Structures are given as structure tokens and as C-alpha cells.
């Protein structure tokens, strides 16, 4: 269903392959190998460096920064802040994956600190993580409303948090939504098996960052929707393979699918539209 | 060979899929991705958090705790102790994987400390690790006896250490044995190729913890045997696939096999019986 | 193209499978699982331990040590130095992978410190990393010359750095070169897709260390060329499989290929010769 959005996404994918943006990750050790491989498969170049003694300097060479708090610790949180400040000074996009926000006080304080001290371009999380971040604002109505998990509630939640944070907010789920505070895009790609493999969320975040690293700031909303759309489509394509329903093969097929993603497949299969 | 044990194990597998227990891991960074994926494939929900600032709090939300000392460091050992105390307060099972116990003084002291300060539900290790832990008791006879590696010696070793620790002890090897200090179960699943892939021991530990997280305390011995039986059977099933003898494909096929494990296959193929 | 070098390499591969050398890694958390699996596939035995409280002791039990600075931090750099000193005392080979040398001051200082304080048997890096290390010597001519990236320039660079460091130096690229400061070997195995998977460089380093761990010191140059030749050939063999052009399957096929590498394939396909 080629439309304005998928056509622009196809152009962005081409830009990634041409520019090979360096995406600096400070991320968890559970899914870091998959994040590096999905970045390469997209056409970007991944680098991971989390020591306070070099993190900001590495960010200085990058075109995008991923901050993922999946296995945060006292040492890496400081590196995230230092790298984030450098990214802001340099004007490169930061994509935040607030893994497990809401689960512990440390994650909550860290997410809050990152959002307060840094200008984040995109926040990508699942519903409970994004609800938690919305609650940080002190109003719980939007969060409660979203408890229904219906699409209208999620559209409202993404838009509200985006306005609150002055960032693009993406909520992944059966239908993904992304908002810059005004416009809201919906993504109807994906399959249930994606939740059977660890790291599909983290990999989505890397894809968003890879796209952002080759795009202009005005394309941020499209990158935020496009990264999760590519992950959803990769899941669909992997599932269609002979061994696609087997979790180990399905996992590997996701990397395969991003690696061979072409304009034709993207235009035919990516489903992004206004919500 | 369906018997009382395999029938109860099939029921436990069903309970995991229904309850989706959260299994908190403080584990090594070598095999952590496989542990997360095998937990998901079993039907459990994995989480990894190792900072002292949140580890115990995360354990407070979990149904089981894995402590794996494969790449321990000063920081994570403290988190293991804090999480372990919380698990004991809350009454959820702890499964200890004493990776490399016997190899360095730090591993030895750490294993000793964890066993002294915490009530551990299951210890799962290979023969040399379990022999080392048995030696901690100050008597070396049992350890020497087990040097023959014969099944009777390993049965005696598991029983003795279980009595000493008041825990269930599982020794993995060509025939796995598990004992609660009285009863001893043997498991005759597995294949030699499992030792050609890193992390098959760690994944077994995760499977034991996943089962424990959905079971009653009186089922602990069965969980301890059942987790290693499922891993052994997954190896057999992976080996039977077309590419099963190839190490990379075999590795992935293990995840596949746990993901599609059903009651029929389990009842037909799992071999657990009294030793 | 069996020749003196490939015949000796085949003998070394047999020695690894017979001796199963323990290869201690202090390495990055991005590709560590692949390094462990490729070591097992080769026939070696991997162990990872990076806490200062045990790292040197673990090295004391090993036959080779890998130092890889891919995700170095203040804590692990100290462990690298302590392990390296123990390796030197014990007379076992150290293989250094200076990942990202040149990218940050911390990496540069660390690489310099490791090279100054330790006797390194083999340094394996890509062209930009090796150029950076050559520059540490204070002369930039060789580096500039190598900017052309032609084979003669890389041969000269490897020989010069090897003389400067009194180590064997391997530069990986379209044609790999390895030199002990006098002789230079070239390796013409490999395929472009190897750069589409993270960790193929790290895995090459592990293969070099695995070979060194079963070899005599006078075979170091051959091990340095042989490890990268085996990785290159594994890439070729993986690419020839049905799904070989798919990045996820290609990745797994590399492990497959090392696992089933036999003397016949090695003698027919490995291309090592004097440069």
C-alpha cells in the first residue's frame, strides 16, 4: 500500500545505505548482538562504548545515539548522560528505549533524569513503559484512560506524552502508534511471534535510530514509525519462511529480512498511515 | 516412556505457559541472550537486572531467581546476595548455577557465600563444579569417590551434597542426576553435541527456574530433573533436523525445540526415572 | 592449493582438536557469545573472566589469552593488564584485538599501555586500527603510505609494525596480511558479506588464539595467518549454502563451517602464501 509515507520511508532506507550512519549505542548486554547485527543489516554502522572515559567522545563521531536502559547500572547511567549531552551539543538525534520503566525506582529515576536533562528525539517503548512516563507528568488520567489499551486511547497517550516531552513518542503493540504531539501515524505491520524473541523491541529502537541518523530533523516522526514498521514487516517475512514458526529460525529470519529489504517489498508491504 | 514423572512434568510445562512466571536472572554476559530466549520459548518471562540499586526490587516482582556466576564481578556478587535475600524473604525459589566453581578463589568464595547466606532451592552444575561444592564441606572422600564418574558415584555425590546444603542438587552429564537428599532421579536425554555449544548448561538452569517459578515447593526435585530433561530432549530433537549436526543450526534448533515442545512429544521422549 | 603453509595449518587444526587448549578471553559483550561458540567449533575451550579478583588466576589455567578492547572499561582494563602479566610470566601467547583503536583517547591509551607493558604474540586488526598503532611509534610515513590501501602498502605496514612491536601483526581486509617483521604471508580467503555480520573480526582473533594455544612459538606467524584464513573460508562456505546470502543464516553458517572444517576442505580451499 504505497502512499506518501512509505515512499518517503523507501527514500530514507536508501539514504541509510548510502550514508552508512554511525549509531552509537549505550544498551543492555542481553540483546546487544542483535542490535549490532540489525544495524548492519539496515545499512548503518553500529558502535558500542559505555565507559565514561570515552562514551561522549564516541558520540562525537556518531550520527545517532541509542540510550537503552535494559541493564543499566550506576556506571553506564553516567555515560548515558555524558553521551546525551554531547549528542545535544552536536545536534544529532537521541533515541531512548525506556526498557522496564515502571518496574523499579532506579529505572524510573533514570528515565526521568534522561528526559529532564536531555533533548530526546524519539522515545520508543511498549504500552506500560510509555504509560509510566506519561505518569511522571503528575497526571494519571491519560494513563488510566489508556488502560483500555484500545487504539484511540493509545493514540491519545502518544500525542499527550509527545507534547509533554517535546519528543516523538512511539508505542509498540499490535498496532504501533507514533506521534510528534500533533500528527499521529499508525503502523499495521507485525506478528504475535515477535514477542516470543527477546530484543525485538531493542532492535526496533536501533532501526529508528539508524533511519534518524540518515534523515533530516523534519523526518523524525516518519523515522519513528518507519523503524517499527520495518521490524514488524521483518517479522511477517520471517514467519513466511519454511521454518518461520520455529523461534530460533524466526529470530534469525528477522535479521535476514532486514538485510534483504528492498524498495519494492517495502512499498508493497509496509503499512503506515495517519491514525 | 510416560510415567509418573513425565506426566507431572507435562502438567508443569502447562502451568508455565499459563502463569508465565517472571524469572529474574543475574547471569553472565556470554550466554544471557540464549537464557532470555529459552525462557520465552518455555513460556516464562525473563528479566535481567544486576545493579545493586534495583536488583532486589526486581526480584520482588519475580516468581524465581537465577544466580549464575559465569562472569561474576565485585559489583554483581553484591547484587546476587541482595536479590537472594529478597527471594528468601518472599519465598520464591533460587536456582544457582556455580559456573566454574573450583577454577578460581573468587568463584569458590562466591559460591560458598551464596550457599551460606541464602536458602537455595536448586544447584545445577557439571560434575567438577558439584564435586568442588561437595569438597567445601571439608570431606574429600565423596569427591574422590566420584572421580570415577560412574553413575553410582554421581548418585551418591548428588545425594550427599543435597543433604549437606538442604537443597536439590542436579549434576548434568551423559546421564543427569538430581537429588533432594533422599530420592534421586536420573535423566537419560541429551546428546554429545550439546557440549559443542556454549550456554547449554546456563539454559538448563533457566529451564529449571522457569519450571520452579510455576510449581509448588514439593515439585522442586521434579523441576530440577525436568529442566535438564527438556534441554537434553531439545538437543535430541535439534540433532534430528536436516542441518542438525551443524553447530550453528544445532544451536538455533535448541530454541526451536523448546518453543514447540508439546505434551505428546514430552510424554513420548522425556526419560526421567528413579536412579 | 595445498602448500607448506596449508599442510602445517591442517596439522595445527588437528593439534587444537587433540589438546583442546583453554582460551581465556577478556573481551567485549557485543560478540562474546560468538567468540565462545567459534572457539568450541574449532575444538578449543573458551572461558571468560574479567574481574580483577580472578582474571589473572584464570589466565594461569589457560593456554592462550585474548585481549579485545571492544567495550573496554576502567575495571576491565586493569584485569587485562593483570592477566597479560600472568600470561607473560607463564609464557603463553597473548592475542590482542585493538577494536576501535584510533577512535577515542581511552582506546588509544589502552592499546598503548597493553603494548608497552605486555609482550603480545599477535596483534590482529583492520587497516585503520593497525595504522593507528603504527602511528604510535611517532613516524607517520608508513601510515600515510598505507592510505592507498594497496597490497604493497599493507605488506609494508604489517612488517614495520611487527618490527616495532616485536610481535606478529595481522591486517584483515580483502586480502589479509600477516608478518613477523621479516616474512609476510598473504591470505586470499573471505567474502564481502563477512563485514555484514558483527564479530567476524573478533571471531578471527579467537581462532588465532585457539591455534596459538595448541602450537609452538615458532608457529605464531602461521597461526596469525591461519586463524583469519579459517574465518575467510568459513565465510565462503557459508555463502555457498542455500540460504547463504541471508545475513542471519550466513552468520550461523560461519559457526557451522568452523565446526565441520576438515583437513581435506582446508587443504583444498585455504589460500595462504608468501606475499
Image (cartoon, coloured by chain):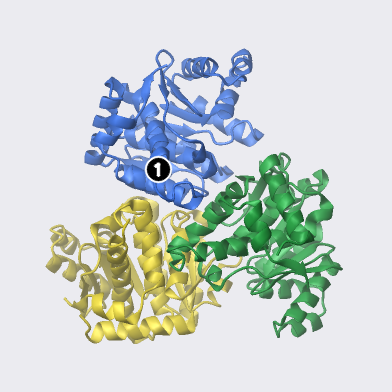
Chain colours: A yellow, B blue, C green
Picture residue at 63% right of the left edge, 36% below the top: B106
User: Which of these two is toward me, C216 or B85?
Assistant: C216
Where residue B209 appears, as percent x and y from the top left, is: 37, 35
Q: Is residue C161 left or right of residue A158?
A: right
Task: Specify whether residue C68 is in view.
Answer: no
- In the rendering, at what x and y percent does residue A271 appear? 22, 75
Specify the quadrant of the image occupied by residue A270: bottom left
Q: Nearer the viewer, residue C264 or A35?
A: C264
In this picture, residue A235 sits left or right of residue C44? left
Q: Which residue is mark 1?
A: B240
Is residue B170 shown above or below A15?
A: above
Q: Is residue B210 left or right of residue C15?
A: left
Q: Is residue B232 above or below residue C163?
A: above
The local secondary structure at tag 1 comes to helix
Q: How many numbered circles does the render carry? A: 1
Q: Is residue C150 left or right of residue A57?
A: right
C200 lies above or below C19? below
Amino acid at each position: 500500500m504505497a502512499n506518501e509515507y512509505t515512499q518517503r520511508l523507501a527514500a530514507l532506507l536508501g539514504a541509510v545505505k548510502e550514508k552508512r550512519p554511525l549509531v552509537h549505542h549505550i544498551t543492555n548486554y542481553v540483546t546487544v548482538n542483535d542490535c549490532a547485527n540489525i544495524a548492519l543489516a539496515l545499512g548503518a554502522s553500529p558502535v558500542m562504548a559505555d565507559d565514561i572515559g570515552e562514551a561522549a567522545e564516541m558520540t562525537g563521531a556518531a550520527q545517532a545515539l541509542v540510550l537503552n536502559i535494559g541493564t543499566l547500572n550506576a556506571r553506564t547511567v553516567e555515560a548515558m548522560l555524558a553521551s546525551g549531552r554531547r549528542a545535544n551539543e552536536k545536534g544529532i538525534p537521541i533515541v531512548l528505549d525506556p526498557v522496564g520503566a515502571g518496574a523499579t525506582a532506579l529505572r524510573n529515576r533514570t528515565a526521568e533524569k534522561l528526559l529532564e536533562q536531555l533533548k530526546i528525539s524519539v522515545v520508543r517503548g511498549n504500552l506500560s513503559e510509555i504509560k509510566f512516563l506519561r505518569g511522571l507528568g503528575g497526571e494519571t488520567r491519560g494513563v488510566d484512560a489508556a488502560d483500555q489499551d484500545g487504539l484511540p486511547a493509545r493514540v491519545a497517550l502518544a500525542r499527550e506524552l509527545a507534547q509533554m516531552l517535546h519528543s516523538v513518542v512511539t508505542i509498540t503493540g499490535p498496532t504501533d502508534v507514533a506521534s510528534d504531539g500533533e500528527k499521529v501515524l499508525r503502523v499495521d505491520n507485525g506478528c504475535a511471534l515477535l514477542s516470543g524473541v527477546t530484543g525485538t523491541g531493542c532492535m526496533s529502537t536501533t532501526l529508528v535510530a539508524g533511519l534518524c541518523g540518515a534523515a533530516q530533523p523534519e523526518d523524525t516522526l516518519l523515522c519513528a514509525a518507519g523503524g517499527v514498521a520495518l521490524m514488524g514487516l521483518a517479522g511477517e517475512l520471517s514467519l513466511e519462511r519454511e521454518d518461520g514458526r520455529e523461534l530460533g529460525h524466526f529470530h534469525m529470519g528477522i535479521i535476514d529480512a532486514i538485510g534483504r529489504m528492498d524498495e519494492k517489498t517495502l512499498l508493497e508491504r509496509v503499512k503506515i498511515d495517519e491514525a
